Image: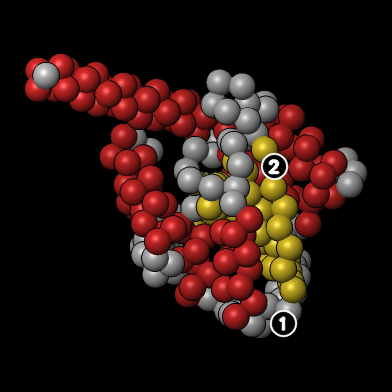
Amino acid sequence: MFKWLAVLFGALLAVAVLVLLAVTWIESRQSRQLAGKQPYAPPATASRAAVVYFSRSGNTALAARHVARRLDAQLFALEAPDYQLGVGGLAHALKDANALKEKLEALPDIRPRTIDLTPFETVWLGSPVWLYSPAPPIWAFVEHNRFDGQHVVLFNTFNSRFGDEHIAAIRAKVMARGAKSFEHRHVLRGRMTQQLTPEQMLQAIDAEWFGSTP
């Protein structure tokens, strides 16, 4: 009996490792493919909108660049050293995303930690969805910054679904940090083997978030 349990455990462990390796390979490929799409140059004049985002595989980064182009906004990228592409970064990301569900104070190190948002009327916050919740780096950014008198738009790219309770929780944090209003926009990309193409994702953003094409 013990022998069969050991075999079963070993098989399950092997499957888990293979899944992590497959996801890591897909993420790395997406990152390479998306890195050069829609390069963004800062607006020449002062902007009243800011787009702050965290992205691991590049999909949310592409969405953020697209939104910034639509709004002629300032663009700010967040980095989380613990979540670099690779099996280790993926495992750390999943561990922290699960911990955040139980304890909202379980926040990662992000860079930059704070941004001067006072020049802006509207702040867009972009993040992938991990384990049905916005990824931990965007929670950390909300925790360390204020949004006094600003309209805040949370936007997410995701593969399956998000939990309304997690969106409500981050909304409460944003409002407690001084925001005057909050809204949530999202785009479902689909499972990793049946995802929208980058072009289809941007078309969905134009239609669903802006109600038009550029």
Q: Is residue 31 left or right of residue 85?
A: right
Which numbered disc covers residue 187? 2
Q: Nearer the viewer, residue 113 or 179?
A: 179
**Residue at 57% in and 28% down:** 191
**Side of 2 relative to 94 (left or right):** left
| Residue 87 disc label | none
Residue 50 position within the rendered picture, expressed as x and y whole percent measured from the top left:
67, 64
Residue at the image point whose x is 73% and y is 63% from the top: 183
- Horizontal and vertical percent for residue 11? 24, 19
**Label total for image:** 2
Q: Secondary structure at mark 1?
A: loop
User: According to the image, label 1 marks what residue?
Assistant: 149
> What amino acid type is highlighted by mark number 1?
Gly
Q: Which residue type carries mark 2?
A: Val
Q: Is residue 107 visible?
A: no
How dense is the environment of label 1, judged by Cα within 10 Å: few (below 14), some, or many (20 and up)?
some
**SS at mark 2?**
strand
Expressed as whole percent of the image width and height from the top left, the position of residue 164 reads 63, 55
Taking the image as drawn, is residue 144 in sight?
Answer: yes
Residue at figure coordinates x 73%, y 79% from the top left: 180
